[in-house]
Image (tube, helix red, strand yellow):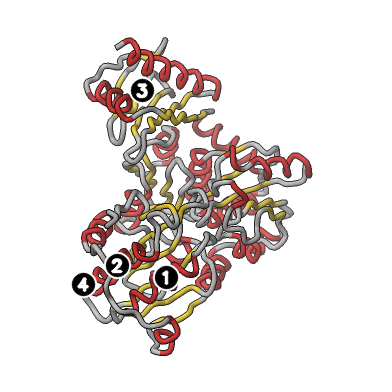
Amino acid sequence: MDTIKFGTDGWRAIIADDFTIENLKRVAWATALWTNNQKGEKHSVVVGYDCRFGGKMFAETSARVLASAGIKVYLSKDFVSTPMVSLATKNLGAACGVIITASHNPASYNGFKLKGNYGGPGLPSMIDEVEKLIPETFAQHLKTHEEYVKEGLIVYHDFEAGYVAHAEKQFDMAAIRNSGIRIGYDGMYGAGQNAAKKLLPGANFLHCDFNPSFHGTAPEPIMKNLTEIAGLIKEKQNIDFAFATDGDADRIGLLDSKGNFVDSHHIILMLVKYLHYYKKKKGKVVNSFSCTSKITEMCAQFGIEQTITKIGFKYICEYMIHEDVMVGGEESGGIAVTGHIPERDGIWIALTLLEYMAKTGKSLDDLIQDVYNTVGTFALERYDLHIDEALKQRIVKNCNEGNYQSFGNYTVTNTETIDGFKYHLGKDKWVMIRASGTEPVLRIYAEAPTYAEAVRILDETKRDVLGREKQG
């Protein structure tokens, strides 16, 4: 028996190794048991899949397992994004949602994400309950897919059409389309490609066809994976705003008119400025611990309540379910805003920024400068140190024991430990050390007024941390 563990955002594994039909049946059966344990009337489950290899087969298998437990399944007609499944779960009144995806992982992976009935990531309590129900083997008899369809237990549904209609109502799409903003979109061969074509028909499209191998590049919208769209911007010299979404389209990568990457920290600040200052929206801001301290500064200036969470969108989602949250965001490109669902959504965030540009007549550079005019300039960078587990644990031990009082010429003024160890190094400067919980990786984050200084802080921290261990 393979032990199946849900990570930060679902169960992911290598196809044909741990991600097999038999293991998938076990997870789907646990989901069925959890669903039937919920109070209320007869429940339904939404099931979708993204562009990965075997997605349709894995989704249909999951649907058959759920149907065998007497659960009505709304199954997507074609590949869909995670936000589309989340939105459908809420709108159809389902007990939960399932999307077969491994998000931004390489093509060799697939996965199983659970969504709550509120239209967002399954909360830790739900995930724990489902995980405990996973049987050692799956022994139920399954009918054919066609039989369950005939019985009305599996019903096909167009989740993408519902999502596009929702976007058309929520945004001033006429203003965006008539603004003259020249848009580029890198679909990364992912599940956002068809919705982007429908919503932004005049854009320049890249990697918007079906390719389950993602042409050999993991569908993660970070700069090293966006060199082609950056090259297209530089070559054409007529694209004002370009964005990319990951494999299941819940994360955004943003590039300016020169092909420069605009990180999530800047995006979150632009969203706060637009929604609060221009659109007069109410609600608090919730962001993860690794985000820029400038969010705190902007919230203080605007009189907005702020909450800082552990790293992982599920923690932000929990606040969005129970409280009035205007913007919720994390460093990795997962951002949500009021008026939608408590879910990360790359396309939705791009549309919000495009509406901001269209309504104000400002360029993306102007919007970023507006942020700097409000809170000052800043830059963040991150190093992922691939080290052995023993070394990683020794460094964490040093952090816990308070053994780091300086890094190079930077003196620690105070330390925060919400999730990892954030060492403040004076005004507008900090470095954070956080160990991965799933792999032998130590992450070091730094913020400073300039990019050059952020890198210098990282280099000095890396040298001190690793050097001390070599000496020891």
Is 36 located above or below residue 118 in the figure?
below
Give the secondary structure at mark 3: strand
Residue indicated by mark 3? 424
Verify CB contact (< 8 Å) between mark 1 and mark 2: no
Residue indicated by mark 1? 47
Verify CB contact (< 8 Å) between mark 2 and mark 4: no
Circle nearer the N terminus (3, 1): 1
Residue visible at 34% across and 27% down in the picture: 422
Mark 4 and mark 3: Cα distance apart in space: 47 Å
Mark 1 and mark 2: Cα distance apart in space: 11 Å
Residue 19 screen position, x and y as percent? 40, 58
Circle nearer the N terminus (2, 4): 2
Residue type, label 3: His
Residue indicated by mark 2? 31
Circle nearer the N terminus (4, 1): 4
Residue 58 screen position, x and y as percent? 44, 67
In-image side of 420 versus 40 (left or right)? right
> Of tags 4 and 3, which is closer to the observer?
4
Circle nearer the N terminus (2, 3): 2
Residue indicated by mark 4? 37
Circle nearer the N terminus (4, 3): 4
Circle 3 Cα neighbour tier, 10 Å, few/some/many (<14 / 14–19 / ≥20): many
Residue type, label 4: Asn
